[in-house]
Amino acid sequence: MQYAYDTENESPALFPVVVKGKWGFIDKSGDLKIQTQYDSAFVFSEGLARIKITKKYFTKYGFINTSGDTVVEPKLDYAEDFSDGLALIRIGNEENGRFGFIDKQGNTVIEPKYEYSGFTKDDARFTDGLAQVRIDGKIGYINKTGNIAIKPQFDWGMLFSEGLALIKSNKKCGFIDKNCEYVIRPEFKSAQSFAEGLAAVLVDDTLGGHWGYIDKKGEIVIPPEFYFTKHFSEGLACVTLATQTPLINVQKRLGGFLASTVPHLYGKCTYIDKEGNQAFRETFDGAYPFSESLAPVKIGAAELNFGYINRSGKFIIRPQFDNALGFSNGLARVMVKDKLGYIDITGSFVWEPAN
């Protein structure tokens, strides 16, 4: 899962910024490449970025390319980023609307007929050629032609990741392959999708939970001794060490989109390797996954306490931000006093915080 920007294989890399309430895009040097003109703008994905236009009585979504040209006119009630060449769109409101998918020319490829309510951004896209849908309250999967590939039958589910999809049936979590065969039968109280060959699973939810990691055979390879875990990234995963204080999982709004702090809680966070060994002695009060060899972490509960550490747990960029996301294409998105800025790997601002 990307926490900062999904801009892989793009050239040039562009980053959304806001000035006096209007959004545009800068390049890696901090030069404004697409003028601030949109009511909201989102990260580029597969060469296109969502933009939002708000009028007096309605809000509409469309897409632009890296030259700033409108590719899909802002006439959509809602849209998500492109993935696997398609983007989810919604017709109608969030409660009663239906979703389908368009291609990069704005053509409807899959008619909007599926239930939308309850979906999140991380549910709403194609991965490994499949996307999940809800029909009569049950989760299944369709292919890119819109045909049902896996019959809706699960109580809950996630996207396919590394060839497997996390599903829930009869209040237990397991994993299926693209043929709807159980690779790991439902036996866990909760779980997370596979990343770098491992998936976090909840074995015991007493006092907030005991999380560990399994491999693709379903075997526990890292014992369930953590109060919370997150996916592996660059060979390390951030975890919450054992504490008698139940987990509090907080979501904070960062520059126009939600980013789950991992975790922002009473217990201490650190990082482990794939053998379950603590990567370094340092612990933190909040942490995100590593990206481009750096990770945002928080010290203490006060403001301006996010900085960046290296893989040895040492601060490379001192704590000075209200919130911070991972690096992508050499820049990281940070918040200072509710203003959005971007820094480079030295911690220098290429775009001073603004709103």
Image (cartoon, rainbow, N blue to C red):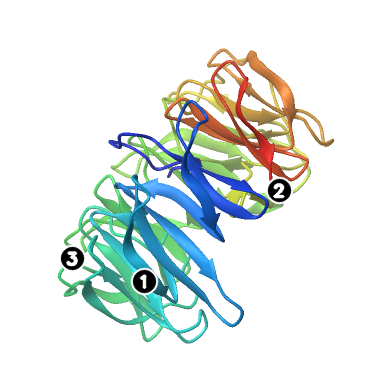
Q: Residue 291 in the image: state x and y as whole percent.
A: 47, 28
Disc nearest the viewer among 2 and 3? 3
Query: Amino acid type of disc 2?
Result: Leu
| Callout 3 secondary element | loop
Answer with left or right where residue 42 lies relative to residue 244: left
Disc nearest the viewer among 1 and 2? 1
Q: Residue 130 in the image: state x and y as whole percent.
A: 23, 61
Distance between mark 3 and mark 1 Cα atoms: 14 Å
The residue tagged 1 is: 89
The residue tagged 2 is: 247
The N terminus is located in which quarter? top left
Answer yes or no: do the residues labelled 3 and 1 have beta carbons within 8 Å?
Answer: no
| Callout 2 secondary element | loop
Residue 337, placed above or below residue 169: above
Query: Amino acid type of disc 1?
Result: Ile
The residue tagged 3 is: 144
**Residue 187 quadrant:** bottom left
The dot on residue 34 is: none
Residue at (77, 30) in percent of width and height: 305
Distance between mark 2 and mark 3 Cα atoms: 39 Å
Distance between mark 1 and mark 2 Cα atoms: 35 Å
Q: Residue 65 in the image: state x and y as whole percent.
A: 33, 50
Disc nearest the viewer among 3 and 1? 1
Residue sitting nearer the eye, 62 or 131: 62
Q: Mark 3 or mark 1, which has the lower sequence index?
A: 1
